[in-house]
Image (cartoon, rainbow, N blue to C red):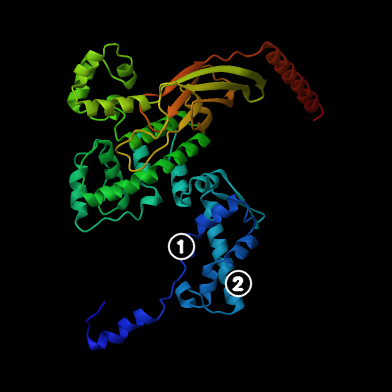
Amino acid sequence: VVLMCQASKKDFYKKFLYDPLPLESHLDHVLADHFNAEIVTKTIENKQDAVDYLTWTFLYRRLTQNPNYYNLHGVSHRHLSDHLSELVETTLAVLDQSKCIAIENDMDVAPLNLGMIAHYYYIRYTTIELFASSLQANTRMKGLIEILSSASEFSELPVRHKEDKLLRQMALHLPNKIDQPTFHDPHTKTNILLQGHFSRRSIPADLAVDQKHVLEESTRLLQAMVDVVSSSGWLKPALAIMELSQMVVQAMWEKDSLLVQLPHFSKDVVDRFTAARINTVFDILEMESDEERQKLLDMTPQQMSDVARACNSYPNIDLTHQIVRTEVVDSGLSAVVEVKLEREEDTEIGPVHAPYFPKEKVEGWWLVVGDPTSNQLLSIKRLTLARRATVKLDFVVPEGVQHKITLYFMSDSYMGCDQEYELDIEIPEDSAVAHMEEQCERTKKNTVCCSFL
């Protein structure tokens, strides 16, 4: 390679060729996320552990070599120690404020629920703090999309030159209008790309690359959102987030026909099936007349083969349940429900049929117990299913809840295969009598104690 340049620039370029480039650490920019992970894994249990952790990093090695870059006022041991202590104090205070960790006795640190969720799904502490502060008991689909789009993981999504004009044009056709949009904002762009994905709109190649990144990040962010909402005990937003996960994987809105999940199902094909009162994949599988099915499909043999393959991979799961234990406790009625899941033998086990999703997806499921009337989520468990599985869920029905408790079986990938059942829970007479006697004894003791006051 021959580089032609001005004589005055020759030494400048020779320096890049023959002298090593200084590499600096950016650990201090993301130190809170690293500390959170190490606190969850018990590597860091107090502030001194945090300082010791930093002494083993590349950041520590570069502090004395390039102090001005890191705003270090000197390279003596005292300057270095003060800088590390201030860095640890500031970082841990930020994590404490975001409720990811707890600082005890001004020295020890312990992980909290939000910090463990952020660590498990490998997301930023600012994102989990946003989820915890923004998600509410009555948050609906539009709000969920906005909260997902506001995640810190999308803050570095590029908005290219003149791309704001294209985004503005795309925003005019969105089903959910964005309040006060800023088209140079990467989070606004994320929202537009997500809604464009649900509507299956064609976009330029550059935007398609960005959309792929958004979709790949969204799956774990949505799982974290489910965990945050579940920790607050809210049922309806949890179910809505699970539906949003299905929308992301299948590239469709919740109001769209379930048949658009099948390949080659254009609007005309969907309309023909809808007119014949066939609205789900299960309806197609249950059609007795092959001739009628072929007439409605009106496709080439290869296309029909694609449809058959997608139908065979669509999950058909038999669910049975029973209450195996109930017991009256102080907070209400404690119960255990045993759920048995078995996939139909003819159903193929493999990756999810999701041609609009950018990577191979393994189907996952949630089992949820809740009271839809009072919007209380009582128990939740995430699982993957091969042929069959048995799962037990413990939950407590709070006192005063007179409604039917419901069991939900929710997919994270397919729409139209969710199931729900009402649970009939009976209070055992022996436990009820024993509980009443115990309450009476406590009342007597409290009365005696009060008489001495």
Residue in the picture at 55% in, 46% down: 116
Above or below: residue 327 compared with residue 95: above
Q: SS of the residue at dot 1?
A: helix
Quadrant (top left, top right, bottom left, bottom right) of the N terminus: bottom left
Q: Nearer the viewer, residue 399 or 46?
A: 46
| Callout 1 amino acid | His
Q: Residue at x 51, y 50 (%)?
A: 98
**For the residues marked 2 and 1, what is the alpha-carbon distance in whole angstroms?**
19 Å
- Is residue 256 something that shows in the picture? no
Q: Which residue in the protein does label 1 denote? A: 29
Q: Identify the residue at image location x=57%, y=74%.
A: 80
Q: What is the x, y in percent for residue 156?
A: 35, 56
Residue 81's label in the rendered image is 2
**Where residue 187 sits: x, y (%)?**
32, 49
Residue 446 point in image, percent of width and height = 76, 25
In x, y percent, where is residue 48? 65, 62
Residue 73's disc number = none
Say which residue appears at 19% left-offset and 56% top-offset: 162
Can residue 327 be seen here? The reply is yes
Closer to the chain start, of discs 2 and 1, is 1
The residue nearer to you, when weighing 356 against 297, is 297
User: Which residue reaches farthest bottom?
Assistant: 7
Query: What's the amino acid at mark 2?
Result: Ser
Q: Residues within 10 Å of mark 2 (few under 14, many from 20)?
A: few
